[in-house]
Image (cartoon, helix red, strand yellow):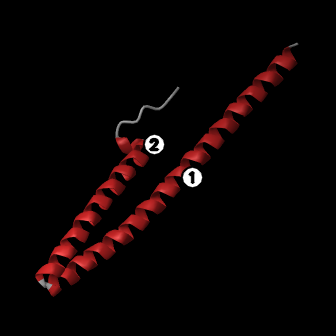
């Protein structure tokens, strides 16, 4: 019996897809902020530039958190696969024992 996820967050793979989309959106925002910083620099808008640099810094921190989340999700997926393989292996061993006992 397999589990059918109801939402994208009901599976590790769905969460990985969401995190990848979020990482793409963050990178796009960082590029926009970099362009805005360059524009503020040309205009001589010092305060605006400083505010945008703070936004860029926070986006960089968010990028690190998203990278960490990706690694954690990969680890969880790997552990799930290992556990499922062990369970399947146990099922085969139990079936083999039952077949041997019946012979």
Q: Is residue 12 above or below residue 51?
A: above
Would residue 16 appear left or right of 54 to someone viewing this image?
right
Q: Which residue corresponds to the image point at 36% horizontal and 67% vertical from the top-left?
A: 62
- Which label is found at residue 25? none
Q: Quadrant of residue 81?
A: top right
Q: Is residue 90 above or below residue 55?
A: above
Would residue 18 appear left or right of 54 to someone viewing this image?
right
Residue pointed to by mark 2:
13
Residue pointed to by mark 1:
75
Q: Which residue corresponds to the image point at 13% horizontal and 84% vertical from the top-left?
A: 45
The answer to whether marks 2 and 1 mark residues whose Cβ atoms lie closer than 8 Å is no
Q: CA distance from mark 2 to mark 1?
A: 12 Å
Pick the residue in front: 100 or 83: 83
Q: Earlier in the sequence, mark 2 or mark 1?
A: 2
Q: Quadrant of residue 94?
A: top right
Would residue 48 appear left or right of 31 to someone viewing this image?
left
- Residue at the far top in the pictured view: 103
Number of marks present in the image shown:
2
Q: Is residue 28 above or below residue 59?
A: above
Pick the residue in front: 80 or 32: 32
Mark 1 is surrounded, within 10 Å at the Cα level, by few (under 14), some (14 to 19) or many (20 or more) other residues, namely few
Q: Secondary structure at mark 2?
A: helix
Q: Quadrant of the C terminus?
A: top right
Pick the residue in front: 75 or 27: 27
* Residue 80 spot, x, y in % from top left: 58, 44
* Residue 82 spot, x, y in % from top left: 65, 42
Q: Is residue 1 above or below residue 61?
A: above
Q: Which residue corresponds to the image point at 45% horizontal and 42% vertical from the top-left?
A: 13
* Residue 27 spot, x, y in % from top left: 32, 60
Would residue 54 appear left or right of 74 to someone viewing this image?
left
Mark 2 is surrounded, within 10 Å at the Cα level, by few (under 14), some (14 to 19) or many (20 or more) other residues, namely some
Q: Secondary structure at mark 1?
A: helix
């Amino acid at each position: 019996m397999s589990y059918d996820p109801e939402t994208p967050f009901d599976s590790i793979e769905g969460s990985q897809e969401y995190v990848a989309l979020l990482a793409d959106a963050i990178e796009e925002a960082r590029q926009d902020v970099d362009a805005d910083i360059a524009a503020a620099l040309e205009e001589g808008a010092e305060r605006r530039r400083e505010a945008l640099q703070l936004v860029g810094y926070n986006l960089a921190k968010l990028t690190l958190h998203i990278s960490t989340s990706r690694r954690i999700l990969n680890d969880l997926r790997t552990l799930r696969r290992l556990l499922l393989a062990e369970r399947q292996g146990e099922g085969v061993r139990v079936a083999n024992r039952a077949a041997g006992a019946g012979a």
